[in-house]
Image: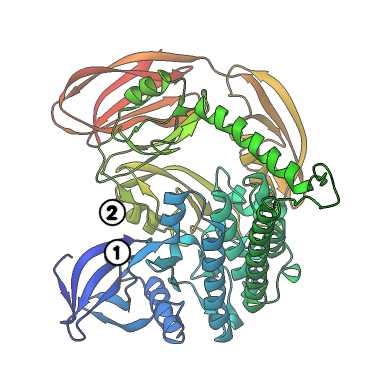
Amino acid sequence: MIGKIINNRYKIISLIAEGGMAHVYKALDIEKDYVVALKILKSQFSGDKDFIDRFMQEAMAFARLNHDNIVKLYDYGSVDGLHYLSLEYVEGNSLDELIRDKKLLPLQEVLDISIQVCQALEHAHQKKIIHRDIKPHNILVDSKGKVKVTDFGIAKAISSATITHAGGMLGSVQYFSPEQAKGERATEKSDLYSLAVVIYEMLTGKLPFSGESHFSIALKHVQERPVNPTFYNSDIPKNLELIILKTLGKNPDYRYENAHDLKEALINYRNINNLNRNEIKKNLEESKFSNTVIQRRSPQQGGRSKKPLNKNYYLIMGLIFLVAVFGYIFSQNEKVPDLKGMTISEAENVLGSQGLKFVIQREDFSEEVEKGLVISQEPEKGDKIPSGSEVNAIISAGDVFVIVPDIVGTNIDRAVEILLENSITINGKEEIYNNDFAEGEVIYQEPARGTKVAPNSLIDIVVSKGKKPQDFPAPRLTGFSKDSALEIITRLNLQPGRITLIESTEYSEGTVVSQNPLPDAIVHDNSVIDLLISSGPGPRKFTRAVPVNMEEDGILKIVVQDIQGESIFLQERRDKGFFSVQVDYFGEGRIIVFLNDRKINEVQVP
């Protein structure tokens, strides 16, 4: 698309971002001679009325909004099968990028961003529009700290706003309000809840709720109380924590009434916080002055004046002592070396020689850093930390990746086609009854839309079996983790019963060995399901050297099928050659080797 001219007006300059349903490009408006952000619906959706309607719905939402903290809509239309929006171009970063770069944002910056988002929501809500997908990815911050809220792709008039549209689940489950997670109508207060999740993340670097699947996260929004943010960051003021927790209330009635009230609470806190800072500074200056005044001797006194010591004297002497102690301790700390560009073994050796520990935080795709090398580290180069401390690193997964498309709400046959078009295949498919989705529609997907994954990656999905009958067969829970089994039981409106631990050499610790009633036995609403859970030791792990003959460069994938199911043991780009790979497996099964999706070897184990 780079260099292409759309509708004889917009010249594509570069790709800014790729979402589940659209690409966003930096483009030049030739007529107006200024840069815009051109959002173009993906070609695979251009023939899908539901996606086109959702895309144009975004245009309708933007068209009704005019506020300094909301991205402006300049133009929209369709030409040659392309559907596009011309939007204000923001020179800066998404809040998601700022959080990833800074980990924890300074308090004043958090307050400034939050207040501006409140202002955007206040305007949108006055226009009877709910955003419904407030998250860091949809909050842009320019170089001067100006905030712009974008992506009203799932916004809808308050009179009919719900979590579903065209049979699909909308929004990002990590930032869902409890009412959205339950499939109820979204309101203005749903946007406030999502913003509170964002504030929580800016201050702690963590989300209030996380889990193995969308099921577990959605249930936690509904059922669990978030951990107080001060648990992760003790520097968060208590008054600000109370504002966050109030806005994270499960019951919308307990949250702030509207965006204006939340904005005022944040502004009042900021003003009081600044006043406190000024008072503290003033008191420190007065204390310093009072302790430098020389006590004059009285003419009537023959000796020295015995002025009682000011209590600030003891405070300052104590501080001097503490500074001296911490100065000594700090001098004994280790200076963190620069790990960027090192391999994992190089980084481990360098840190080990200084008595520090190397921890891989995660892998990220990178176009600049070669696969297997360190992209970034925390603490940074030059920081001093105690001996024995951990240094967290992000490792490059290489520059070959695809973006996971959004298939929630899509019929399974079409979903398979979309996934294949994006070089992704279905790994596991669970089918459950669901009253909100038609039979055959995808309810959940993992990884989520917009996630970067390696080509030929696998995806797990849950598909609706349609409306739940009055009596229905019990789900098959054997092999699921205990948490996943309980999620499925709850989702089907069944009741968890007794959970009994039993030793097992076939099933890993924490997985379901058996259940009562058995799979496919007829049950009904509120039937009780008892679970037998493995306490270990689980299946024994073996290792087998598998020969690999790569006749060409390409993607090497090794799949293990054993008593634990099917999993990808290795998937990476390799140069051609003949070598062997040590592959782990459990019990018995087979190991299959693929080169560029073509099977080149299969080994039965043991």
- State the image quarter where residue 561 is shown: top left
**Between disc 1 and disc 2, whose residue precedes?**
1
Considering every residue shown, the one lying at the far right of the view is: 300
Element on which disc 1 rests: helix
The residue shown at (15%, 82%) is 8
Quadrant (top left/top right/bottom left/bottom right) for the C terminus: top left
Looking at the image, can residue 187 be seen? Answer: no
Residue type at tag 1: Gln
**Vertical arrangement, residue 512 with respect to residue 520, above or below:** above
Q: Which residue is mark 2?
A: 421
- In the rendered structure, find residue 44 and report the number of the disc placed on it: 1
| Viewer-proximal residue among 492 and 146 | 146
Compared with residue 457, is residue 605 higher up or lower down, i.e. above or below?
above
Residue 25 shows which numbered tag?
A: none
**477 or 584, nearer to the observer:** 584
Contact check, label 1 and label 2, Cβ < 8 Å: yes
User: Residue at left 41%, top 86%?
Assistant: 63
| Residue depicted at 81% across the width and 53% down the height | 299
Question: x, y percentage for residue 345?
Answer: 34, 22
The picture places residue 384, in percent across and down from the top left corner, at 47, 33
